[in-house]
Amino acid sequence: MLRILIWISILVINSDAAKKMIIIPPPSTEIYTDTTIYCRVSGGEAEFQWFKPNGEEISDNDDDLRVETVDEETSKLIIANIQLKHNGVYKCKSIFEDNQEKVSSISISVTKKISISNTDTYKEFLEGSNAVLSCNATGIPAPDIIWLHDRLDVTKKNDDRIKVIDNRYLHINGIRKTDSGTYTCKAQIKQRNEELSRDFSVVVNVPPTAQIQKEKNIIAGPNKNLTLICLVNGNPKPTITWKRNEKPLMMDTSKYSFNSDKSELNIRGIEKSDEGNYTCVAVNTLGEASDKTWLNISVMPKVMLNETAVVIPGQNINISCKATGDPLPTIIFSRNGKTLKSDEKKNADGTTIASFPIKNMNPSDGGAYTCSATSPAGRDSKTIQVITIPSTPVNVMVIPGPASLKINFSGLLDGGAPIISYTLQWRHKGRNDWDSTTVKAAEPLRISGLKSYEKYEVRVSASNTAGQSKFSEIMTAQTKALQGEPDKPVFSSEGTVEGNSYNISFQQLEDGGVPIQHYIVRYHAVSGNEDVKELRLDPEAKFVILEDLEWNTEYEVEIRAVNNRGESKPSIYNFNMPQELKAVSQKKGLGIGGIVAIVMVILLVLLIAVDTACYYTNHCGMMMCIAVNVFGKRPPGAKQHDFEGSSRFTNEVKLQGLNLPRGSVSKQLNGAQCEMTCDKAPLTQFEKLPHKGENGSSSFTEA
């Protein structure tokens, strides 16, 4: 395809700011296509004239150039079938009604898209010959040519054999197999960012070559496999065949196999009999090539040794080891990385035998003994496990725990086999019979389910596959309380009966390190089928009141403390409710308020009775004061002194010659002061009534 690159140079001549003129460039100037140029003014109507690059005005006589008026402000120039001759600068002239003129110009450059003519894109060359590739690319302007090999610029390879000539030819001197591949001719016009590519496939034909990768130190074995690799080169691709000892290799699928092009020969289960001469043959249309290799196969040492030997303590044992291989191996014994002295003998049957003695077997002799056979072909080893019973546990430590005992010890010899279990025995101190349990070796040595704060005797033994050791010496320890479990509540005093209720006080001595959440109280009558009743108390509770109990009945109470670790053991309390005390029973429906009212009425009646008695017998008291001060009366027989001209007592009565009797009480009644006394002494003075004097005053006379 052809693309357009337009160089536009617009010259606008402005003589008046109100009148303007512009030229709109064509969308394309592709050769052999029609293109249109617009000329437009603003600020008024105008007439237009168009001029060729040579300065001539374009007229109707020009076949390939045509001017058309679009409207009063726009004109267009149409170039039909644009060609190279149409290159140049075109001018548009506008004449306004006031005879003002405006001129604008535009440069037209005819373009042609890049094209690459048909050519043979597959090329074959013989290795070593000179190769030439041609790229026939055209365009306006002429495109630049870049050659790529496998997408890399060939000029950047720094290879003097490869050159680009006349911007179109690629020369490769002495072409090689590595020069095969895809070559790309890329034509591009940078001014308008246009490019076009064409790929060429280059094949370099090469005569065949063959080379077998040599194998060293080939070791036989049923699980050993060998791969012979033949490196073959050539184009066209050679066909490959194999020979063994100059004879075509018989295709035994259980023994031999190949990859897809037969460049790899796989031999399964290498044996000594697979030794020999192997040949790889490569053939193509240009010739034949081959390569040979000799396989020298060794046999790895193989050790034959028993896996285990169980020995009774004090017994003697002789460990024997046999090994085979080509060449014959050498045998050594070792234990824990340390070489042991042994006897070795090489036999005519292709075996080596060695032995190692152990005398007076004990647990420290138990363990792994390794027999190693070594030769230039390799090394093999096997281990025999010599086993006897473990040693007696020593340095035993018994660590007390919550209702449990933990056992630790050190210095145990396993006798050559892993400890599989431990036997733990315990008993209360001073008893004869032992309790026993077996613990797996991976588990902690712990005796659980014991009683808290009890002394126990403990011993331990170890077992492996050979048997059980002797028991350790006896150790003594005392258990602790269960961690986190609260102690049972303790009743602090005897309970008390309150009616048909019972009050029991208790206290919590130990909470196990975890706060008490609540208490659970259960109680029931010992005899009969009465249901068990349950109460829940706050953690701060110090007593419990059991209500609505039956008289003359025995009860059992159980209290448990609860925290988030569990419940305590129960504290049990038994008590008897007495027979009902009917003599002190109260009338049903009479409450405390009624009793208080009755008592107050009784007291009031007693007060009135006493005051009345005082009034009539001793002429004193509250009633006496009220009668004198309120009603102006005295009780019959009362001692009084009337004042002349007055029908009542004055506000103040003085007893001359007498002090106020002890125990008198001053009372204020209706504004009058009176003295109340219960003094029963008879009056000795002023027993006579006062008589009037001459001045109207009153006076007392002696009795």
Image (tube, rainbow, N blue to C red):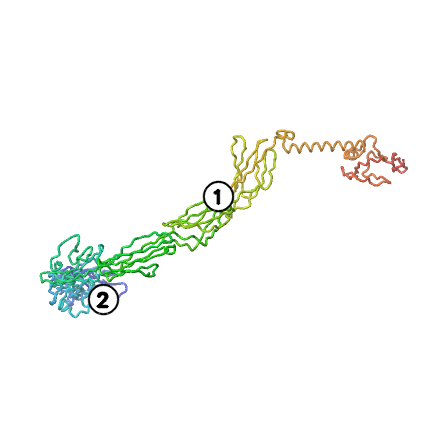
**In the displayed structure, would residue 243 be above or below residue 469?**
below
Horizontal side of 12 relative to 657 (left or right) equals left
Mark 1 or mark 2, whichever is nearer to me: 1
Number of callouts? 2
Going by the picture, which residue comes out furthest to the bottom? 160
Quadrant position of residue 239: bottom left
Between 494 and 99, the one lying in front of the other is 494
User: Pointer 1: residues within 10 angstroms few (<14), some, or many (20+)?
Assistant: few
Does residue 149 appear in the picture of this structure?
yes
Residue type, numbered disc 1: Gly
Instruction: Identify residue type, mark 2.
Output: Leu
Instruction: Categorize mark 2 by other alpha carbons within 10 Å: few (<14), some (14-19), many (20+).
Output: some
Residue lying farthest right? Answer: 694
Residue holding disc 2 = 11
Whether residue 63 appears in this view of the structure is: no
**Disc number at residue 566?**
1
Q: In which quadrant of the rendered image does the N terminus lie?
A: bottom left
- Of 460 and 483, the residue lying toward us: 460
The image shows residue 472, relative to residue 139, as above or below, that is: above
Decide if residue 496 is on the left or right side of residue 71. right
